[in-house]
Image: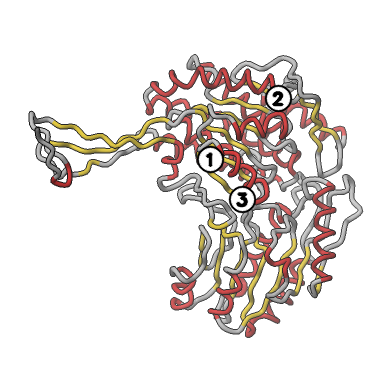
Amino acid sequence: MKAGEIAGVQEALERLGIAEINSGAGWGEWIERPRGGDLVSINPSDGSQIARVRMAAAEDYEEVVRHAAETFPRWRDYPAPKRGQIVREIGDELRRHKNDLGMLVSLEMGKVFSEGLGEVQEMIDIADFAVGLSRQLYGLTMPSERPSHRMYEQWHPLGLVGVITAFNFPVAVWSWNALIAAVCGDCVVWKPSSETPLVSIAVQKICDRVFARHGWKGVFNLVIGRGTDVGERLIADRRIPLISATGSCAMGYRVAEAVARRLGRNLLELGGNNGVIVMDDANLDLALRAVLFGAVGTAGQRCTTIRRLFLQKGIARRMTESLVAAYRQIRIGHALDPETLMGPLVNRAAVDEMMRGLERIREQGGEVLYGGNRLDLPGGCYVEPALVKAHPEMLMLREELFAPVLYLVEFDRLEQAIEWHNSVPQGLSSAMFTTSLISAETFLSAGGSDCGIANINIGTSGAEIGGAFGGEKETGGGRESGSDAWKAYMRRQTVTINWSNDLPLAQGVKFEL
């Protein structure tokens, strides 16, 4: 980074209250010298070192979880609307620090500044949503078949919630879980990605200050550390009934097995490999703009990134030519440059993985129509986004290459496109562009898209917090935010009250001496 940029970052860190903090473990108080070794936060836009963070070791993890477990019984009994009031104040603090947090997201992860700001706005929106939920944790009343009996269900806090987040949305996904879990009465233990330690510390510090004003510590807890020291302990910890994990399908299998072994709960948000179908009757200008952001935004590193584009043959050539022309105009560069549309990949290993993936694509008969090259820019994390003409039998179509690679597949009939679309193991987000009501409703029917999210005439990215977010198949089946997703963070209890002096049994059973 240049001298002016370094000064700006330092000022932002001071405003966020983390200029003097190098500890990666805390619960409202910070462990002075965690024993897990150093972690260097790298700016992928230029390869420079932003800061060093001391990681937690196994002993530090135990200390943090112990404090969270001690806090939970008191937090559980604190009235939900008052829990919501604290979350509202957290949202206000996030608003106050939006620019600094957005810049830190961009610096650590590499997404462009507008996307960094959008991620912080998502936290703010979730805070507002959670405040409303704090007065709406409703249970149902059911009629009993027995006279003078009343039945209802109620919801109780679940306990400790372990949250494992990925680098691509380093704080937004945490907020989906933590802010809703908090109003539900749970305490949260957060293991963030090792690629983005500073922004997680910044968010934890902001929350600590708000909780301290109300006399609380240990509701939100942070543990930055290696998978062997922290991650494996977290997913195997019987004190933590729910693990919410975001990451690759391979990681999800490991989490699911470990949590199931102790009969815990998991909430998994895993691979996407999202597809879009463009029909002959589509508004192609609309489709082009949506595909550009969906495929290139966040440098192709969103779980909702468009990876497969199915083009009906009547418009395939025109759409392909328009995409190639548009890709040539994409401005690639430093994440904080206001002219940049696509920043770097998160690290050099991601670049290497993309190059290996393109080699396999060529071996399987894929034709790279544009891009796919490394770029000789500072930091070594830049690539050209790639457009690939593919055939539906290509094995690479079934994998999620977490990079800006978009496959173009031509089709004749809608039924054929839906079959190809659904033939992959993942099932997160999907979309169709059409002006036909019949085509749209076919895509949205039970025999249409098999994904957790299905859109018409918008892309696969940019989910709003009011709708439950998640997918099917290897995506994990979890749902976060929106709708009744709060129930994942609570336990349901069915209650029956007999207000008579008789004891009738259900189903007409007789048992009398």
Q: Compared to 315, does 206 lie above or below?
A: above
The alpha-carbon separation of the residues under discs 3 and 2 comes to: 25 Å
Image spot of residue 327 (x, y percent): 76, 66
Question: What residue is shown with label 1?
Answer: 176
Task: Locate residue 301 relative to residue 265 in the image: left or right.
Answer: right
Q: Amino acid at mark 1?
A: Trp
Residue hosting label 2: 24
Tell me what residue is drawn at x 53 percent, y 41 percent.
266
Q: Position of residue 232 (x, y in %)?
A: 66, 34
Colour scheme shown: secondary structure
* C-alpha distance separating marks 2 and 1: 21 Å
Q: Which residue is mark 3?
A: 270
- Residue 126, percent from left and from top: 50, 40
Q: Which mark is residue 371?
A: none
Mark 2 and mark 1 in contact? Answer it, CB < 8 Å.
no
Q: Are marks 3 and 2 in contact (CB under 8 Å)?
A: no
Identified at 69% across, 55% down, the residue is 297
Give the foreground label among 1 and 3: 3
